[in-house]
Image (cartoon, rainbow, N blue to C red):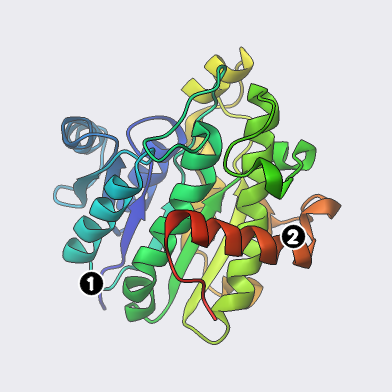
């Protein structure tokens, strides 16, 4: 049986690190992503010391605030895994002040939404080659408070940190729905999820609070990545390792289509037909 190979973005700490560790312990080869080569390699060493099987982890890197580096990351992944079993779009930021990516996007939407859109499209051939690929988008219950005005993508007319974050998490769910529709008969499924209120750097810096441990925060990501028989539920939203309803306003086919097409245009990838 072929060993599954999976990519976890933002795996240098928090939920991403625990997701990579749990997937490796479960028998997967895991590509561990961090912003820089040094951080990615340090993470591989640390997670191996924490119990990942020897040789189960491989470092990949790229700053998701740069479309060029997203493409470079995808090239690394395709070289390491021509057949990729899963992409876990876990990396995310919460910005207290308005900043721009290398491409001029507001940082929150650039890293949390547009980078995953581009990375997913860049890796679709590898995901299809596995015969049963999965794209797992780590959203948040905060999506329920998000609103998406296409005129504010990729730079909002007024910036508020929480509003930008919640909107980006809603974009994750909208993207998941549209991607599921457009994948059609391709052998790739996609899911969005809420990991729980977890004690991570993002929660501390963005919200000034603590939550549950990061090991429990990885649970739903690991479930969506590995649980058998989920393919028929492509496009679904999960929390606590079970399918749950997303916010009602996250089910808007017209907005999903328009956001997807604008996002593809912004990052320079061809929309799926």
Q: CA distance from mark 1 to mark 2?
A: 33 Å
Residue 96 location (% of width, % of height): 57, 17
In the rendered structure, find residue 125 and report the number of the disc placed on it.
Answer: none
Residue at the limit of the structure toward the right, as seen here: 248
Work out whether 21 lies above or below 258.
Answer: above
Q: Is residue 250 visible?
A: yes
In this view of the protein, which residue sits in the foreground, 219 or 259?
A: 259
Which is more N-terminal, label 2 or label 1? 1
In this view of the protein, which residue sits in the foreground, 144 or 102?
A: 102
**Residue neighbourhood size for the residue with mark 2, other residues' Cα within 10 Å, grouped as few (<14), some (14–19), many (≥20):** some
Quadrant showing the N terminus = bottom left
As helix, strand or loop, the secondary structure at mark 2 comes to helix
Q: Which residue is pictured at 31% across the width and 67% down the height?
A: 4
Residue at the limit of the structure toward the bottom, as seen here: 185
Residue 125 location (% of width, % of height): 34, 75
Work out whether 193 lies above or below 189.
Answer: above
**Residue neighbourhood size for the residue with mark 1, other residues' Cα within 10 Å, grouped as few (<14), some (14–19), many (≥20):** some
Q: Which residue is pictured at 69% across the width and 26% down the height?
A: 158
State left or right for residue 53 relative to residue 171.
left
- Looking at the rendered structure, the number of numbered marks drawn on it comes to 2
Residue 144 location (% of width, % of height): 78, 41
Q: Label 1 belongs to which residue?
A: 82
Q: Which residue is pictured at 67% across the width and 22% down the height?
A: 160
In the rendered structure, find residue 255 and report the number of the disc placed on it.
Answer: 2
């Amino acid at each position: 049986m072929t060993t599954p190979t999976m990519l976890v973005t933002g795996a240098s700490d928090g939920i991403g690190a625990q997701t990579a560790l749990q997937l490796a312990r479960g028998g997967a080869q895991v590509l561990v992503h961090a912003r820089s080569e040094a951080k990615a390699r340090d993470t591989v060493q640390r997670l191996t010391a924490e119990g990942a099987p020897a040789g189960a982890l491989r470092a990949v890197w790229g700053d998701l605030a740069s479309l060029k580096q997203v493409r470079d990351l995808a090239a690394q992944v395709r070289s390491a895994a021509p057949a990729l079993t899963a992409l876990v779009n876990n990396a995310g930021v919460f910005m207290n002040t308005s900043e721009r990516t290398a491409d001029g996007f507001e940082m929150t939407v650039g890293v949390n939404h547009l980078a995953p859109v581009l990375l997913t499209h860049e890796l679709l051939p590898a995901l299809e080659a596995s015969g049963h690929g999965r794209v797992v988008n780590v959203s948040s219950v905060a999506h329920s408070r998000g609103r998406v005005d296409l005129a504010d993508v990729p730079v909002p007319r007024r910036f508020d940190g929480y509003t930008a974050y919640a909107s980006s998490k809603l974009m994750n769910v909208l993207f998941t729905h549209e991607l599921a529709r457009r994948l059609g008969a391709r052998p790739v499924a996609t899911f969005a999820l809420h990991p729980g209120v977890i004690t991570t750097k993002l929660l501390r810096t963005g919200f000034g609070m603590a939550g549950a441990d990061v090991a429990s925060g990885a649970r739903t990501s690991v479930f969506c990545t590995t649980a058998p028989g989920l393919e028929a539920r492509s496009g679904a939203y999960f929390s606590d390792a079970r399918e749950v309803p997303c916010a009602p306003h996250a089910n808007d086919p017209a907005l999903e289509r328009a956001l997807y097409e604008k996002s593809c245009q912004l990052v320079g990838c061809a929309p799926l037909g």
